Amino acid sequence: MRSAAGGALLGFQRVRDNFELVAKYGDGVPLYLFSDLFLRVPQLREMFPVNMRSQRERLMGALAFAVEHAGDLAAITPYLHHLARSHRKFGARPEHYAQWSVSVVNAMRRFSGSAWDDELEREWRDFLTAVSQVMIDAARQDGSTRPPHWSAEIISHERRAVDTAVIRLLVDEPFPYVPGQSAPVEVEKWPNMWRYYSMANVPRQDNTIEFHVKGDGAVSQTLVREMREGDTVKLGWPVGTLTLNPNTERNILLIAGGTGFAPIKALLEHVIRLPVPPWVSLFVGAREPEGLYDFDSVRSWAERYSWLSVRAALSEIPAPDVAASGTVAEVVSRYGRWGGYDAYVCGPAAMVEDTVSMLRENGFSDNRIRLERFALAAPPTQRFAI
């Protein structure tokens, strides 16, 4: 059976087996694949960032995820739709999927050796055609209701710390998102290098949003150190799972570290607008007082709302008049009993890991802990890492 129907009946098993065989060549595979693509269609190079390393890892991770589910593509259709929406901000068009598919086949053939034959090539083409069609249809449908990206002007830029800025932007048209989500941002200096930042407020009628940015990467450093009022950026479609759970009557425990405070602040603003807010306890952690760059804003909310309590934690430089000493996880564990609460956690990876471990030790099941995960993102793969 060599047709598309035959490939589907077999679950594209030869594709999956062949992909595992080729994966042992690591980063040589995407290097060859993209070299083939840019040599055949040089105009596509401008759609990608100058440094291709992370782009190679993401695209090969997406391919690996699709191959893994080749036997049931319907199960990952939501993921493929998300991917198609994301690709629109790069200017992806239907013919680009066809060129990508050609280069995938060329790369698989190159690294398969004697395992390659005409039947396997047909199955790969059938598989890639099926995947591409799902994404093309999704992109076409998305294009009927949304722009590929939004433009936003910086209307306020405040340096709250040496490496941290609170940036307010005016988006050129309505920018729909759910409090707690993040959006990819592109700056002119780094074309096609999109980085995700969380909105720190609920959607507003005036189309303004707020980002909290720590200058720890090329795009972030540009946003913090170089950009000013009047400069513009591009925004992509928002994603993320750190959103308020509407199917619970539990109280809420919010835990933030660093600029992970941004989506937590948006969640808190969301709760403020509920007709009957639950009890909320907010903990914000930092290493030194400077890291509590926006704590005063929520402290003023706590003075206004009786159902809200806020506390800060400092792990390295003590300031007893400002915060408790210890990591935010340690401070949370010292306060109260959390049996009737759902927890929302965002911050640096080590802080999140430490906090989740503490919550589990205190009786939290995973369905009572919400973290910042980009919705429907494929799991990372190390098979093509350098």
Image (spheres, rainbow, N blue to C red):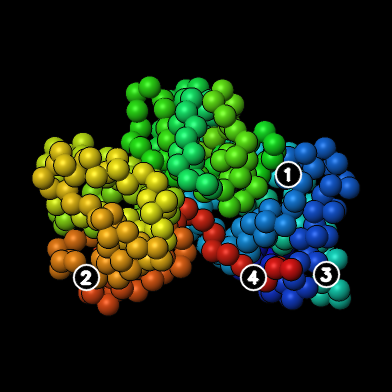
Residue contact between numbered discs 4 and 3, judged by CB atoms under 8 Å: no
| Residue type at numbered disc 3 | Phe
Location of residue 225 (image quadrant): top right
Q: Is residue 272 above or below residue 216?
A: above
Measure the C-alpha gap from mark 4 to mark 3: 18 Å
Element class at badge 1: loop
Quick one: label 4 or label 1, which is nearer the N terminus?
Answer: 1
> Is 347 left, or right, of 385 in this rendering?
left
> Is 3 left, or right, of 153 in this rendering?
right
| Residue type at numbered disc 2 | Arg
Measure the C-alpha gap from mark 4 to mark 1: 21 Å
Residue that appears at 41% across and 25% down: 207
Q: Nearer the viewer, residue 328 or 37?
A: 328
Residue at mark 4: 382
Q: Farthest residue in the right direction?
A: 39
Element class at badge 3: helix
| Residue type at numbered disc 1 | Phe
Query: What crowding class fits label 4: few (fewer than 14 Cα within 10 Å), some (14-19), or many (20 or more)?
Result: few
Residue that appears at 36% across and 44% down: 294
Element class at badge 2: helix
Q: Is residue 29 above or below residue 140?
A: below
Residue at mark 1: 48
Mark 1 or mark 3, whichever is nearer to me: 1
